[in-house]
Amino acid sequence: MIRAIWNRISEIAREEESGQAMTEFVIVAPVQFLVIAGIMQFALFNTAVIVVNHAAYTAARAALVGDESPGVGSQGMAERAAIFICSSIAGSSDVAGGASVSYPGPNGRATLARSAAAASKTRVKINYNQDGQAVQAIVTHEYELAIPVVRHLFKTPGLPYRTPHVAIREDCIMPCPWGRRR
């Protein structure tokens, strides 16, 4: 008896709401997709900020303990260290140029993947304070936004790329307790 009543109530409810679920889906699905894609892009962006922060730390450390003379090509050790770290988030390279980073591998020298893209998108500035007791590394990386549709909402205008990018700037100040030669 209860089963028959329940079946009849379900039948009536299905008849009255036949197009309502589809209408709700058409209204809610694009908004839900945009929110989920925005959350994904925000998570990727936060990861990129952490990577650029680590690149600033690495560049400051390389400038502090490394040789001040330029490294491979025209890159100093600090710039090379920052490019090495930022190559994991470099994305594709829309702009030609930038030297790739090579390192000793098991079969001779190997080239780091996406390092040419990282070299064209990463800028490093090293500052020493007046008494030589600290070094500051400022790393700016132009991060390529990855999620379609959402990436056009957050792009930085004026960057010379076909795909939207955002400039991420991080700095690190590292003390030099032993003093720095000038």
Image (tube, rainbow, N blue to C red):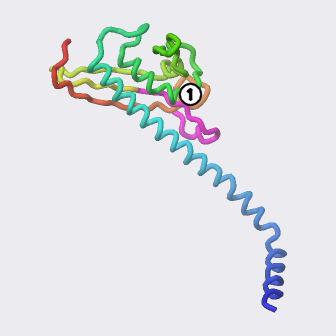
In the rendered image of this protein, does residue 44 appear above or below residue 109? below
In the rendered image of this protein, does residue 167 appear above or below residue 130? below
Pinpoint residue 11: horizontal percent, then vertical percent.
83, 79
Q: Would you say residue 182 is visible in this rendering?
A: yes
Q: Nearer the viewer, residue 156 or 15?
A: 15
For the point 15% across and 20% down, which residue is it? 131
Q: In which quarter of the image is the N terminus?
A: bottom right
For the point 19% across and 17% down, which residue is it? 180
Pinpoint residue 96: horizontal percent, then vertical percent.
57, 15
For the point 38% across and 10% down, which residue is it? 71
Amino acid type for the residue under numbered disc 1: Gly
Which quadrant of the figure has residue 182?
top left
**Residue 43 is one of the magenta-drawn residues:** no
Other residues around mark 1 within 10 Å, as few (<14) / some (14–19) / many (≥20): some
Q: Would you say residue 152 is visible in this rendering?
A: no
Pinpoint residue 99: horizontal percent, then vertical percent.
50, 12
In the rendered image of this protein, does residue 50 appear above or below residue 91? below
Tell me the residue that label 1 is attached to: 91
Q: Is mark 1 on a helix, strand or loop?
A: loop
Counting the numbered discs, the total is 1
Q: Which of 130 and 75 is in front in this view?
A: 75
Pinpoint residue 81: horizontal percent, then vertical percent.
39, 21
For the point 41% across and 18% down, which residue is it? 80
Which quadrant of the figure has residue 151?
top right
**Which range of residues does the magenta coloring cover?**
140-156
State left or right for residue 179 relative to residue 148: left
State left or right for residue 34 relative to residue 180: right
